Image (cartoon, rainbow, N blue to C red):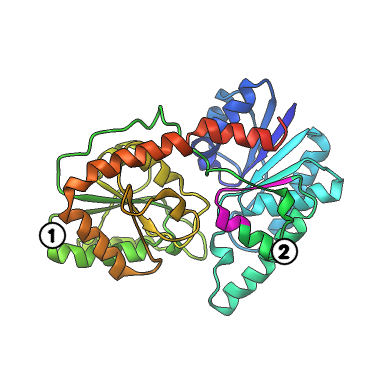
Amino acid sequence: MKIVIIGAYPNSIIGFRGPLISTFVRAGHDVTVMTAHASADVVADVTALGATFQPYPVERNGLNPIADIRTLLAIKKTLQVLKPDQVLAYTIKPIIWGGIAARIVGFKNFHAMITGLGYAFEKGSFARNLVNFIVKHLYKCALAKTKSVIFQNQDNLKLFVELGLVEAEKCYRVFGSGVDIDEYQQQPLPRQATTFLLIARLLGDKGIREFASAAKIVKQRYPEAKFQLLGPYDSSPDKISMAEVSQWQTAGHIEYLGETDNVKASLNACHIYTLPSYHEGLPRTVLEAMSVGRPILTTDAAGCRDTVVNGENGWLVPTRNVDALVSRMIWFIEHPEQWQPMANKSRKMVEDNFNVKQVNEAIGNIIGL
């Protein structure tokens, strides 16, 4: 069977979709992976999995009509030339323009995987509300003829159905992207000052500003506590500038670790994994942290709440609430005897629900492989 997987950001294709690509290839399918133009290393990694890499023009952020038309036409041409049996698209631009391209050429086996709602679903300023309005209408158009729509959490599924963006009978739910529990094995908690780690692209809706504000307050009481931030700059309208990050670091509130393709060393070196995000599909970094055996401090928000049983493997706090974040950070610092039981519970939850093998098997079944 000929399968096309369409993403946007090339540097995440191996980390987030590598096991899925491998699963399809090992089952004997001919797999083509499409993202924006990638480095030679990324292309080599995709090829090493047994798939074919094909770049196409796509801008991950913004609504540039000319650029988006190029994206639409490129996907349309690919469908006409490759004549795949199944197409799986994930993230907003590939889903919207891929779904519309499939409608234009009459391709019936187009599958969309909603990995989160992102900036486009956040309301606020006139510009943001306008983007919200446009994106919802584009989603409705793109999903009208899809074969299936796969969600990573029940909140997003329910919202899309309630907004009339997709019919309920087309919707399926999987437990995120999953995590390789053999690659991310449980590790002992380190013997050092209490370390809170946040891994995310430098975006406001990841709760990074709240993390920095909470760190400032907590360090006044517990100056030895560490607050680490790991993640790349992002060009989204919701971006956090490097200048702002530098200010936090210069003030001694956080330690910025830059970006990396391998987060395991940082996860292994922390005690509490923290993600104060406003919304997620189902956060991969949290699953990785749970797999190596770390208590979780995250928000009671879509996607995030699926990873925590309150008081058992961590704590949930309200979104955008610095005081609640501070309170739970202090709780963790003052209750180190609770870390190991929570770490063990995190690992058990991953083994039971978020194993990447189970997730990829479910995706394969949904798209008819």
Kindly identify the amino acid type of the residue bearing the numbered disc 1. Answer: Pro
Residue 101 image point, x, y percent: 79, 49
Residue drawn at x 68%, y 66% is 163
Residues rendered magenta in the picture:
148-157
Q: Which mark is residue 164?
A: 2
Pointer 1 local density, CA inside 10 Å: few below 14, some 14–19, many at least 20: some
Residue drawn at x 28%, y 67% is 213
Kindly identify the amino acid type of the residue bearing the numbered disc 2. Answer: Gly
Above or below: residue 194 compared with residue 292: below
Under tag 1, what secondary structure?
A: loop
Residue drawn at x 41%, y 52% is 200
Pointer 2 local density, CA inside 10 Å: few below 14, some 14–19, many at least 20: some
Residue 145 image point, x, y percent: 80, 51
Above or below: residue 130 compared with residue 271: below
In the drawing, does residue 129 fall left or right of residue 194? right
Residue 54 image point, x, y percent: 67, 36
Residue beneath disc 1: 223
